[in-house]
Amino acid sequence: MTEFLVRHFVKNYEETEKVSVRTAYGVLASVVGIFCNVFLFAVKWMIGFFLHSIAVMADAFNNLSDAGSSIIGLVGVKMASKPADEDHPFGHGRIEYIAALIVAFLVLQVGFTFFKDSIGKIREPEELKFQLVSIIILILSIGVKLWMGYFNRTLGNKINSKVMLATAADAMGDVITTSATILAILFWKVTGINIDGFVGIGVSLVVMWAGVGIAKDTLEPLIGEAVDPEEYERITNFVEGYDGIVGSHDLIVHNYGPGRSMASIHAEVPNDVDIEVSHEIIDRIERDAIKNLGIFLVIHMDPIETKDTYVLQVREQVEQTLDALDPAVSIHDFRMVDGKEQVNLIFDMVVPFEYDKKKQDELRMTLIKLLQIVDHRYQCVITLERSYVASAKES
Protein backbone atom coordinates (compact mmCIF):
# COMPACT_ATOMS: atom_id res chain seq x y z
CA MET A 1 0.00 0.00 0.00
CA THR A 2 2.80 2.41 0.90
CA GLU A 3 4.63 1.93 -2.41
CA PHE A 4 1.31 2.18 -4.28
CA LEU A 5 0.52 5.55 -2.72
CA VAL A 6 4.04 6.89 -3.30
CA ARG A 7 4.13 5.79 -6.94
CA HIS A 8 0.70 7.26 -7.74
CA PHE A 9 0.80 10.51 -5.74
CA VAL A 10 4.47 11.57 -5.70
CA LYS A 11 5.81 12.62 -9.08
CA ASN A 12 9.48 11.71 -9.60
CA TYR A 13 9.37 9.97 -6.23
CA GLU A 14 12.93 8.66 -6.53
CA GLU A 15 14.46 12.17 -6.74
CA THR A 16 14.18 12.79 -3.00
CA GLU A 17 16.89 15.46 -2.96
CA LYS A 18 14.52 17.88 -4.78
CA VAL A 19 12.47 20.24 -2.62
CA SER A 20 9.38 19.70 -4.78
CA VAL A 21 9.57 15.93 -4.28
CA ARG A 22 10.10 16.31 -0.52
CA THR A 23 7.05 18.57 -0.42
CA ALA A 24 4.99 15.97 -2.28
CA TYR A 25 6.03 13.32 0.24
CA GLY A 26 5.04 15.66 3.08
CA VAL A 27 1.65 16.41 1.53
CA LEU A 28 0.97 12.71 1.01
CA ALA A 29 1.87 11.84 4.61
CA SER A 30 -0.28 14.70 5.93
CA VAL A 31 -3.35 13.83 3.84
CA VAL A 32 -3.16 10.15 4.78
CA GLY A 33 -2.71 11.14 8.43
CA ILE A 34 -5.74 13.45 8.37
CA PHE A 35 -8.00 10.85 6.76
CA CYS A 36 -6.95 7.93 8.98
CA ASN A 37 -6.99 9.88 12.26
CA VAL A 38 -10.39 11.53 11.65
CA PHE A 39 -11.81 8.10 10.85
CA LEU A 40 -10.29 6.58 14.01
CA PHE A 41 -11.51 9.51 16.13
CA ALA A 42 -15.11 9.10 14.94
CA VAL A 43 -15.10 5.35 15.55
CA LYS A 44 -13.41 5.51 18.97
CA TRP A 45 -15.52 8.44 20.17
CA MET A 46 -18.70 6.50 19.47
CA ILE A 47 -17.30 3.40 21.20
CA GLY A 48 -16.09 5.44 24.19
CA PHE A 49 -19.43 7.21 24.51
CA PHE A 50 -21.33 3.93 24.36
CA LEU A 51 -19.02 2.11 26.81
CA HIS A 52 -18.70 5.09 29.20
CA SER A 53 -14.89 4.68 28.98
CA ILE A 54 -12.65 7.67 29.64
CA ALA A 55 -9.68 5.64 28.37
CA VAL A 56 -11.33 5.08 25.00
CA MET A 57 -12.42 8.75 24.84
CA ALA A 58 -8.87 9.85 25.64
CA ASP A 59 -7.59 7.59 22.90
CA ALA A 60 -10.17 9.03 20.50
CA PHE A 61 -9.22 12.64 21.15
CA ASN A 62 -5.58 11.68 20.88
CA ASN A 63 -6.38 10.60 17.31
CA LEU A 64 -8.18 13.90 16.75
CA SER A 65 -5.09 15.78 17.91
CA ASP A 66 -3.07 13.64 15.50
CA ALA A 67 -5.40 14.76 12.70
CA GLY A 68 -4.89 18.37 13.75
CA SER A 69 -1.17 17.72 13.78
CA SER A 70 -1.37 16.42 10.22
CA ILE A 71 -3.24 19.58 9.15
CA ILE A 72 -0.57 21.77 10.73
CA GLY A 73 2.08 19.58 9.15
CA LEU A 74 0.43 20.02 5.74
CA VAL A 75 0.40 23.81 6.10
CA GLY A 76 3.98 23.74 7.37
CA VAL A 77 5.22 21.62 4.47
CA LYS A 78 3.55 23.90 1.91
CA MET A 79 4.97 27.04 3.54
CA ALA A 80 8.42 25.45 3.89
CA SER A 81 8.48 24.76 0.15
CA LYS A 82 8.41 28.49 -0.67
CA PRO A 83 11.57 29.43 -2.61
CA ALA A 84 14.29 31.68 -1.25
CA ASP A 85 13.69 35.41 -1.39
CA GLU A 86 15.55 38.61 -0.55
CA ASP A 87 14.76 38.38 3.16
CA HIS A 88 15.32 34.60 3.41
CA PRO A 89 18.22 33.70 1.09
CA PHE A 90 18.32 30.13 2.42
CA GLY A 91 14.61 29.50 1.86
CA HIS A 92 11.80 28.80 4.33
CA GLY A 93 12.58 25.17 5.22
CA ARG A 94 12.71 25.75 8.98
CA ILE A 95 8.97 26.49 8.96
CA GLU A 96 8.54 22.70 8.88
CA TYR A 97 10.29 22.49 12.25
CA ILE A 98 8.14 25.30 13.67
CA ALA A 99 5.01 23.45 12.53
CA ALA A 100 6.22 20.30 14.23
CA LEU A 101 6.84 22.28 17.43
CA ILE A 102 3.24 23.52 17.37
CA VAL A 103 2.13 19.91 16.94
CA ALA A 104 4.17 18.92 19.99
CA PHE A 105 2.38 21.51 22.16
CA LEU A 106 -1.02 20.33 20.89
CA VAL A 107 -0.16 16.74 21.78
CA LEU A 108 0.96 17.84 25.26
CA GLN A 109 -2.27 19.80 25.75
CA VAL A 110 -4.42 16.79 24.84
CA GLY A 111 -2.44 14.53 27.16
CA PHE A 112 -2.68 16.96 30.08
CA THR A 113 -6.42 17.45 29.60
CA PHE A 114 -7.15 13.74 29.76
CA PHE A 115 -4.77 13.32 32.68
CA LYS A 116 -7.09 15.62 34.66
CA ASP A 117 -10.21 13.85 33.36
CA SER A 118 -8.75 10.46 34.32
CA ILE A 119 -8.18 11.64 37.89
CA GLY A 120 -11.85 12.66 37.96
CA LYS A 121 -12.85 9.17 36.78
CA ILE A 122 -10.80 7.60 39.57
CA ARG A 123 -12.60 9.73 42.16
CA GLU A 124 -16.07 9.16 40.65
CA PRO A 125 -15.92 6.01 38.47
CA GLU A 126 -18.77 5.18 36.06
CA GLU A 127 -19.96 1.69 35.27
CA LEU A 128 -18.42 0.36 32.05
CA LYS A 129 -20.28 -1.48 29.31
CA PHE A 130 -18.89 -4.38 27.30
CA GLN A 131 -19.55 -5.07 23.64
CA LEU A 132 -17.48 -7.59 21.69
CA VAL A 133 -17.93 -5.64 18.44
CA SER A 134 -16.40 -2.57 20.09
CA ILE A 135 -13.34 -4.54 21.14
CA ILE A 136 -12.98 -5.90 17.60
CA ILE A 137 -13.15 -2.38 16.17
CA LEU A 138 -10.49 -1.17 18.61
CA ILE A 139 -8.25 -4.08 17.58
CA LEU A 140 -8.72 -3.10 13.94
CA SER A 141 -7.76 0.47 14.84
CA ILE A 142 -4.49 -0.91 16.21
CA GLY A 143 -3.87 -2.45 12.81
CA VAL A 144 -4.48 0.95 11.17
CA LYS A 145 -2.01 2.65 13.51
CA LEU A 146 0.60 -0.05 12.94
CA TRP A 147 0.36 0.59 9.21
CA MET A 148 0.53 4.38 9.76
CA GLY A 149 3.67 3.91 11.82
CA TYR A 150 5.24 1.84 9.05
CA PHE A 151 4.02 4.32 6.41
CA ASN A 152 5.51 7.38 8.11
CA ARG A 153 8.74 5.61 9.02
CA THR A 154 9.20 4.46 5.41
CA LEU A 155 8.57 7.95 4.01
CA GLY A 156 10.65 9.56 6.75
CA ASN A 157 13.63 7.35 5.93
CA LYS A 158 13.25 8.06 2.21
CA ILE A 159 13.55 11.84 2.64
CA ASN A 160 15.37 11.91 6.00
CA SER A 161 12.49 13.73 7.72
CA LYS A 162 12.63 13.89 11.50
CA VAL A 163 9.03 15.12 11.55
CA MET A 164 7.78 11.98 9.79
CA LEU A 165 9.92 9.73 11.97
CA ALA A 166 8.46 11.45 15.05
CA THR A 167 4.96 10.88 13.64
CA ALA A 168 5.81 7.21 13.17
CA ALA A 169 6.93 6.99 16.80
CA ASP A 170 3.72 8.73 17.86
CA ALA A 171 1.68 6.15 15.91
CA MET A 172 3.43 3.32 17.74
CA GLY A 173 2.61 5.09 21.00
CA ASP A 174 -1.04 5.08 19.93
CA VAL A 175 -0.79 1.31 19.44
CA ILE A 176 0.32 0.99 23.05
CA THR A 177 -2.43 3.27 24.40
CA THR A 178 -5.23 1.52 22.48
CA SER A 179 -3.93 -1.87 23.59
CA ALA A 180 -3.96 -0.67 27.20
CA THR A 181 -7.52 0.56 26.77
CA ILE A 182 -8.66 -2.84 25.46
CA LEU A 183 -6.97 -4.57 28.39
CA ALA A 184 -8.79 -2.27 30.85
CA ILE A 185 -12.17 -3.18 29.35
CA LEU A 186 -11.35 -6.89 29.31
CA PHE A 187 -10.05 -6.69 32.89
CA TRP A 188 -13.36 -5.12 34.00
CA LYS A 189 -15.31 -7.80 32.13
CA VAL A 190 -13.40 -10.65 33.84
CA THR A 191 -12.96 -9.23 37.36
CA GLY A 192 -15.61 -6.52 37.67
CA ILE A 193 -12.89 -4.09 38.79
CA ASN A 194 -12.91 -0.71 37.04
CA ILE A 195 -9.36 0.44 36.29
CA ASP A 196 -10.46 2.71 33.46
CA GLY A 197 -9.32 5.91 35.16
CA PHE A 198 -5.89 4.47 35.97
CA VAL A 199 -5.46 3.29 32.39
CA GLY A 200 -6.61 6.73 31.24
CA ILE A 201 -3.75 8.24 33.28
CA GLY A 202 -1.34 5.83 31.62
CA VAL A 203 -2.68 6.75 28.18
CA SER A 204 -2.37 10.46 28.92
CA LEU A 205 1.23 10.03 30.13
CA VAL A 206 2.15 8.16 26.94
CA VAL A 207 0.55 10.95 24.89
CA MET A 208 2.47 13.63 26.80
CA TRP A 209 5.72 11.66 26.46
CA ALA A 210 5.15 11.53 22.70
CA GLY A 211 4.68 15.31 22.71
CA VAL A 212 7.95 15.80 24.59
CA GLY A 213 9.73 13.52 22.10
CA ILE A 214 8.39 15.46 19.10
CA ALA A 215 9.42 18.77 20.72
CA LYS A 216 12.92 17.46 21.45
CA ASP A 217 13.43 16.16 17.89
CA THR A 218 12.19 19.49 16.51
CA LEU A 219 14.18 21.80 18.76
CA GLU A 220 17.53 20.12 18.09
CA PRO A 221 17.88 21.28 14.46
CA LEU A 222 16.45 24.70 15.36
CA ILE A 223 18.98 25.22 18.14
CA GLY A 224 21.81 23.75 16.06
CA GLU A 225 22.85 20.13 16.47
CA ALA A 226 26.17 18.41 15.87
CA VAL A 227 26.87 16.75 12.54
CA ASP A 228 25.51 13.22 12.33
CA PRO A 229 28.44 10.75 11.98
CA GLU A 230 26.93 9.24 8.81
CA GLU A 231 26.50 12.70 7.28
CA TYR A 232 30.06 13.52 8.32
CA GLU A 233 31.37 10.43 6.54
CA ARG A 234 29.26 11.14 3.45
CA ILE A 235 30.55 14.69 3.03
CA THR A 236 34.20 14.06 3.95
CA ASN A 237 34.40 10.98 1.71
CA PHE A 238 32.92 13.04 -1.14
CA VAL A 239 35.49 15.83 -0.70
CA GLU A 240 38.46 13.50 -0.17
CA GLY A 241 37.48 11.44 -3.21
CA TYR A 242 38.85 14.10 -5.58
CA ASP A 243 42.42 13.94 -6.88
CA GLY A 244 44.46 16.69 -5.31
CA ILE A 245 42.72 16.49 -1.90
CA VAL A 246 44.75 14.63 0.73
CA GLY A 247 42.49 15.12 3.75
CA SER A 248 39.80 17.23 5.39
CA HIS A 249 38.68 18.48 8.80
CA ASP A 250 36.54 21.07 10.61
CA LEU A 251 33.27 20.13 8.90
CA ILE A 252 30.36 22.30 10.07
CA VAL A 253 26.81 21.79 8.77
CA HIS A 254 24.05 24.39 9.17
CA ASN A 255 20.49 23.12 8.76
CA TYR A 256 17.95 25.41 7.09
CA GLY A 257 15.21 22.79 6.94
CA PRO A 258 14.99 19.17 5.78
CA GLY A 259 17.05 18.78 2.62
CA ARG A 260 18.36 22.35 2.87
CA SER A 261 21.85 22.47 4.32
CA MET A 262 24.88 24.72 4.10
CA ALA A 263 28.28 23.39 5.15
CA SER A 264 31.89 24.51 5.46
CA ILE A 265 34.97 22.28 5.53
CA HIS A 266 38.76 22.59 5.46
CA ALA A 267 40.31 20.61 2.61
CA GLU A 268 44.01 19.74 2.76
CA VAL A 269 46.01 20.10 -0.47
CA PRO A 270 49.74 19.48 -1.18
CA ASN A 271 51.76 22.63 -0.56
CA ASP A 272 53.89 22.08 -3.66
CA VAL A 273 50.97 22.24 -6.12
CA ASP A 274 50.24 25.49 -7.92
CA ILE A 275 47.60 27.40 -5.95
CA GLU A 276 45.49 28.01 -9.05
CA VAL A 277 45.35 24.27 -9.75
CA SER A 278 44.22 23.53 -6.20
CA HIS A 279 41.72 26.39 -6.34
CA GLU A 280 40.17 24.98 -9.52
CA ILE A 281 39.73 21.60 -7.78
CA ILE A 282 38.09 23.31 -4.79
CA ASP A 283 35.68 25.18 -7.07
CA ARG A 284 34.74 21.94 -8.85
CA ILE A 285 34.02 20.17 -5.56
CA GLU A 286 31.78 23.03 -4.42
CA ARG A 287 29.79 22.91 -7.67
CA ASP A 288 29.49 19.11 -7.57
CA ALA A 289 28.38 19.18 -3.91
CA ILE A 290 25.29 21.21 -4.81
CA LYS A 291 24.44 18.83 -7.65
CA ASN A 292 25.30 15.48 -6.02
CA LEU A 293 24.77 16.11 -2.29
CA GLY A 294 22.22 18.92 -2.35
CA ILE A 295 24.49 20.92 -0.01
CA PHE A 296 25.82 24.45 -0.46
CA LEU A 297 29.44 23.69 0.48
CA VAL A 298 32.10 26.31 1.24
CA ILE A 299 35.65 24.91 1.28
CA HIS A 300 38.69 26.46 2.95
CA MET A 301 41.97 25.31 1.43
CA ASP A 302 44.80 24.20 3.76
CA PRO A 303 48.22 23.55 2.14
CA ILE A 304 50.16 20.78 3.94
CA GLU A 305 53.48 19.00 3.54
CA THR A 306 53.20 15.68 1.69
CA LYS A 307 56.77 14.89 0.54
CA ASP A 308 59.30 16.01 3.16
CA THR A 309 60.08 12.74 4.94
CA TYR A 310 61.44 14.46 8.04
CA VAL A 311 58.28 16.54 8.55
CA LEU A 312 56.09 13.49 7.93
CA GLN A 313 58.15 11.47 10.40
CA VAL A 314 57.77 14.12 13.11
CA ARG A 315 54.04 14.35 12.49
CA GLU A 316 53.77 10.59 12.88
CA GLN A 317 55.68 10.86 16.18
CA VAL A 318 53.18 13.44 17.42
CA GLU A 319 50.19 11.34 16.34
CA GLN A 320 51.54 8.15 17.93
CA THR A 321 52.37 9.95 21.18
CA LEU A 322 48.90 11.51 21.31
CA ASP A 323 47.16 8.23 20.46
CA ALA A 324 48.94 6.51 23.34
CA LEU A 325 48.04 9.41 25.65
CA ASP A 326 44.36 9.76 24.62
CA PRO A 327 42.93 8.02 21.52
CA ALA A 328 39.83 10.27 21.62
CA VAL A 329 41.96 13.25 20.55
CA SER A 330 43.31 14.00 17.06
CA ILE A 331 45.38 16.66 15.28
CA HIS A 332 45.35 18.44 11.93
CA ASP A 333 46.97 21.45 10.18
CA PHE A 334 50.42 20.20 11.20
CA ARG A 335 53.35 22.48 10.30
CA MET A 336 56.99 22.43 11.37
CA VAL A 337 59.62 25.16 11.50
CA ASP A 338 63.01 23.46 11.78
CA GLY A 339 66.08 24.90 13.49
CA LYS A 340 69.30 23.76 15.12
CA GLU A 341 68.40 24.84 18.63
CA GLN A 342 64.61 24.75 18.40
CA VAL A 343 61.96 22.97 16.31
CA ASN A 344 58.52 24.53 16.36
CA LEU A 345 55.61 22.10 15.97
CA ILE A 346 52.43 23.96 15.06
CA PHE A 347 49.10 22.12 14.91
CA ASP A 348 45.43 22.09 15.94
CA MET A 349 44.28 19.51 18.49
CA VAL A 350 40.65 18.35 18.48
CA VAL A 351 39.28 17.32 21.89
CA PRO A 352 35.85 15.92 22.89
CA PHE A 353 33.23 18.40 24.09
CA GLU A 354 33.10 16.89 27.58
CA TYR A 355 36.72 17.89 28.30
CA ASP A 356 36.75 20.97 30.53
CA LYS A 357 39.46 23.63 30.42
CA LYS A 358 41.46 21.97 33.19
CA LYS A 359 41.56 18.64 31.41
CA GLN A 360 42.42 20.31 28.10
CA ASP A 361 45.35 22.17 29.69
CA GLU A 362 46.58 19.01 31.41
CA LEU A 363 46.38 17.10 28.13
CA ARG A 364 48.28 19.79 26.25
CA MET A 365 51.05 20.07 28.88
CA THR A 366 51.44 16.29 29.12
CA LEU A 367 51.74 16.01 25.33
CA ILE A 368 54.39 18.74 25.26
CA LYS A 369 56.44 17.00 27.96
CA LEU A 370 56.23 13.63 26.20
CA LEU A 371 57.32 15.16 22.88
CA GLN A 372 60.26 16.93 24.53
CA ILE A 373 61.40 13.55 25.82
CA VAL A 374 61.53 12.43 22.18
CA ASP A 375 63.49 15.57 21.20
CA HIS A 376 64.27 18.35 23.70
CA ARG A 377 64.22 20.92 20.87
CA TYR A 378 60.49 20.47 20.27
CA GLN A 379 58.42 23.55 21.10
CA CYS A 380 54.68 23.13 20.52
CA VAL A 381 52.22 25.77 19.42
CA ILE A 382 48.86 24.03 19.93
CA THR A 383 45.42 25.41 19.12
CA LEU A 384 42.67 23.52 20.96
CA GLU A 385 39.42 22.81 19.09
CA ARG A 386 36.29 20.79 19.67
CA SER A 387 34.69 18.48 17.14
CA TYR A 388 31.36 19.36 15.53
CA VAL A 389 30.56 15.69 14.96
CA ALA A 390 27.99 13.98 17.21
CA SER A 391 29.49 11.13 19.27
CA ALA A 392 32.31 10.52 16.83
CA LYS A 393 36.03 11.10 16.70
CA GLU A 394 37.07 13.46 13.94
CA SER A 395 40.09 12.07 12.15
Image: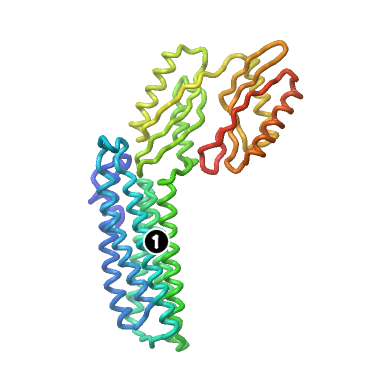
328 on left or right of 144 = right
Q: What residue appears at the point 26 percent right and 47 percent down from the top-left corner?
A: 79
The residue lying toward the viewer, choosing from 369 and 57, is 369
Whole-percent x and y of residue 394? 55, 35
**In the rendered view of the protein, which quadrant contains the C terminus?**
top right
Q: How is the image coloured?
A: rainbow
The residue lying toward the viewer, choosing from 109 and 236, is 109
350 on left or right of 371 = left
Determine crowd level at label 1: few under 14, some 14-19, many 20+ residues with C-alpha closer than 10 A: many
Answer above or below: position of 146 versus 334.
Answer: below
Answer above or below: position of 280 versus 18.
Answer: above
Q: What residue would you read off at disc 1?
A: 170
Whole-percent x and y of residue 307? 58, 14
Secondary structure beneath dot 1 equals helix
Q: Quadrant of residue 313?
A: top right
The residue lying toward the viewer, choosing from 104 and 206, is 104
Q: What residue appears at the point 30 percent right and 69 percent down from the top-left corner?
A: 40
132 on left or right of 316 = left
Whole-percent x and y of residue 174? 39, 66
Tell me how many marks there are: 1
What amino acid does circle 1 point to?
A: Asp
Q: Quadrant of residue 298?
A: top left
